[in-house]
Amino acid sequence: MTDRGEAALRLSADEMRVGPSRLAWQAGRLVVEFDEATLPHPGRLRGRVVVTPSAITSAELPLAPDGSHVWRPFAPVARVQVEIDRPGWTWAGHGYFDANFGTAALEDDFRYWTWGRFPTRPGTREEGAVCFYDAIRRDGSELGVGVLFDAAGQARAIQPPPKAPFSRSLWAVRRETRADAGYRPRQVKAMLDAPFYTRSAVRTKFAGEETVGVHEALDLDRFASPWLKPMLAVKVPRRKRWRWDD
């Protein structure tokens, strides 16, 4: 994606445009259309993602006691279709749509966190998802939450299974998730690796059922270091000015 100035933003009740890309709710679906420059290999990436939720939830999870950081799982159970203008870059399957909101910088309030979302009973009428959120805050307190979602979007807090470490990322970011006692999770597909962040498809076991879902780990001590932040500008194009044609 491209960092842009305020002039590139247009916002309405059903649509958000940022330069040539947009997100819009259309007939109960979230449609994402993007047309962005790529770095470090110059070029453009164009495509479309359609997220069809089985339901929209009203759940919110405060990540800090003062409510300064909130996780909002809009559609923890959804079908996703991806079409990108490159050969073979299409995909359809089980997915989700969520977001994080905050009034403070993450690195000011957290040292480390992991998050995972794993489908339960995939491919059935009872298809749902379980999410695990674990974090170590700057004040030394910890967050450890498990939430189970059904196909209707109903959320239920659960006692999460034990923490289970697994292999570090390519940048040696520490990783762990939740799993049934005695089970060791493992990565089955790499998605994104950075010096402070990793995202991957991970196989774990919950309530006796093996499941593969999306997992992320974020080392905010690394992210806060002054040598790392300038590196982000190498990966993310920036454009200060934008003019609308209409």
Image (cartoon, grey):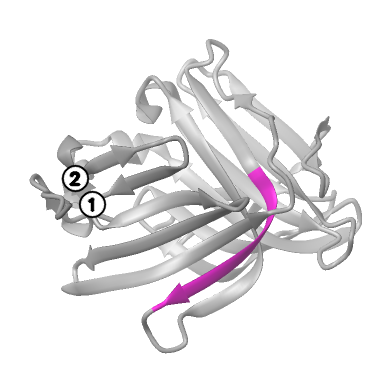
The residue sitting at 60% across, 24% down in the picture is 142
102 or 136, which is in the foreground?
102
Kindly indicate the quadrant of the structure image that contains residue 70.
top right
Q: Secondary structure at mark 1?
A: loop
In the image, which is nearer the foreground, mark 2 or mark 1? Answer: 1
Q: Secondary structure at mark 2?
A: strand
* In-image side of 148 versus 190 (left or right): right
The magenta stretch spans residue 82: yes
* In-image side of 70 versus 209 (left or right): left
Is any part of residue 173 visible from this angle?
A: no
Q: Name the residue furthest top.
A: 66
In the image, residue 190 sits, relative to residue 222, either above or below, namely below
The answer to whether the residues at label 2 and label 1 have Cβ atoms under 8 Å apart is yes
Among numbered discs 2 and 1, the one appearing first in the sequence: 2
* In-image side of 121 versus 142 (left or right): right
Circle 1: residue type:
Gly
The residue sitting at 22% across, 55% down in the picture is 236
**Stretch in magenta:** 75-84
Residue 55 screen position, x and y as percent? 73, 46
Residue 137 screen position, x and y as percent? 50, 23
91 or 199, which is in the foreground?
91
The quarter of the picture where the N terminus appears is bottom left
Q: Which mark is residue 19?
A: 1
Identify residue for label 2. Answer: 4
The residue sitting at 86% across, 60% down in the picture is 121
Residue 34 screen position, x and y as percent? 34, 62
In the image, residue 45 sits, relative to residue 97, either above or below, namely below
Q: Name the residue furthest bottom.
A: 87
Circle 2: residue type:
Arg
